[in-house]
Image (spheres, grey):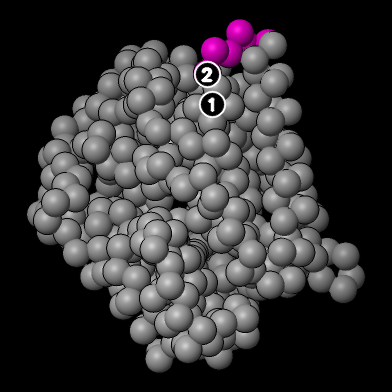
Amino acid sequence: MNQTGLNSLYQGNFFWQRLPGQQTLRGLEPGQCYLMGYLSNEQALYRQLNIENDDQQALLNAAVKKWRHELNRHLFGDYLLINFDGEQLQLTSSARASFTLFYRQSQNEQGQYGLALASNLKQLTQVFDAKINPVQLMQTLALGSLADEHTCFKQIKQLQSGETLIWQLAGETRLSHSSNLPVAQQLTLAQNSALPQAELIAPRRTDDIELTELFNRLPSLAHGLGQPLVDASLAHFDAQVQATDSDTLLLDISWLSARHITCEQGIHSSHNWCKSILKRPLLAQRSQLQYRQQQLVSAYQTAKQEQNEKLSFSQWLDLHYVIPAWCQLLQGICRLHGKILVNPYMHAQQLIPLVTQAYQAPAAYFSLQQVSLANVYDAMQRLFYSGEVETRKLFDLNPLDTSRLIRREQDRHRVEQLSVLLLTMDYLTRFHPGH
């Protein structure tokens, strides 16, 4: 396979901007296609389009001209493609892609629109001093990351797998085309993806890791990615990526098993007590969270009727929302270190056994719990002796009361869950995209 697809756009952080009401464009050259990731049918495309081998730019230009809106139905692999001809800007993502771009369409006082793109979320949050969207932050904490267009920041969205967006840039900036591959077609197309050569990343092991140390890495990793994180397994993956010499890594399935830890562990039957520690400002977002849950359940019921879906709701959500989002996070971590992650687990036949074997606690995706730290006393010490004032305001607790709670509570598992939630919120309040 030709490896020129692993090009400079992938190697570094990418940023492009057009200001509202101005013709100034920066970050892209007209007439150029930019590919982030790899094509698995590149050699076949050279023959099909009658393009000389190894001239990938000519190949991409010919493919865009021939297929335009339906480009990702013909280009197989794991990629994100940007095409800029001076008048239009096209973003195309492959089926089940682990690559994504973040974008922000802004409007000035005269009603004129501008557009900015970035391969790293932090680039947009810093440039525009983006504000946290509390509803989306709550969703990330409660559900983990889900593969959709939303981010934790107001006005910033991300390209979805199988999505094509085209902006008209001549005159006023406006979105002129938007389409998305149906889920069933994405899974079918993903089966056609051959894999480039890559070094297998070390499998995930849990018997030789220090969870507290990993949890302490999360804030710096969140800063690098430009978004909040709530799972220490991501810090574990980051450490493994840093320890490898290869620029192209093959994903081991054990790292997919690390997704959304509540799927793998039994939740205590009285876990609702955990919600009682949240004060009104946080609880006010729960209606929005429940509305999001209803949307997903409706989508599941539709899929069940149209596609004879046999998976449970939790399994369906895991397959189509949780795993793709998790793969995007893993790919983002690799890109922080100038590496690319090759994912051999892109279609349903490979993933359904993993999905059906995972522990599915009732309403696990919608509980306000993340179990990623086992040292309760260290968590409480960090919270009350090095935590921010905002954290202490958020929770109606103090060190003396909490100390009594720990001594009196016999169920250590419940106390650990409380500690993790508090410590998670502690570092999220310290997280700021501009610092």
Residue to which mark 2 is pinned:
311
Residue 197 appears left or right of 62: left
Whether residue 126 is in magenta: the answer is no
Farthest residue, direction right? 110
Tell which of 215 and 403 is nearer to you: 403
Residue to which mark 1 is pinned:
316
N-term-proximal mark, 1 vs 2: 2
The residue at the point 31 percent across, 78 percent down is 378
Rendered image: mark on residue 68: none
The residue at the point 47 percent across, 75 percent down is 405
Residue 46 appears left or right of 87: left
Residue 310 appears left or right of 211: right
In contact (CB < 8 Å): disc 1 and disc 2: yes
Q: Is residue 332 above or below residue 17?
A: above
Dominant secondary structure of the magenta stretch? loop
Tell which of 11 and 207 is nearer to you: 207
Q: Amino acid at mark 1?
A: Trp
Secondary structure beneath disc 2? loop
Q: Tell me the quarter of the picture where residue 203 sits.
A: top left
- How far from the left and from the top, in percent, is residue 240? 18, 55
Secondary structure beneath disc 1? helix
- How far from the left and from the top, in percent, is residue 189? 45, 18
> How many other residues sit within 10 Å of disc 1, few (<14), some (14-19) or many (≥20)?
many
Q: Amino acid at mark 2?
A: Leu
The residue at the point 30 percent across, 34 percent down is 343
Magenta residues span 306-311
Q: Is residue 139 above or below residue 259?
A: below
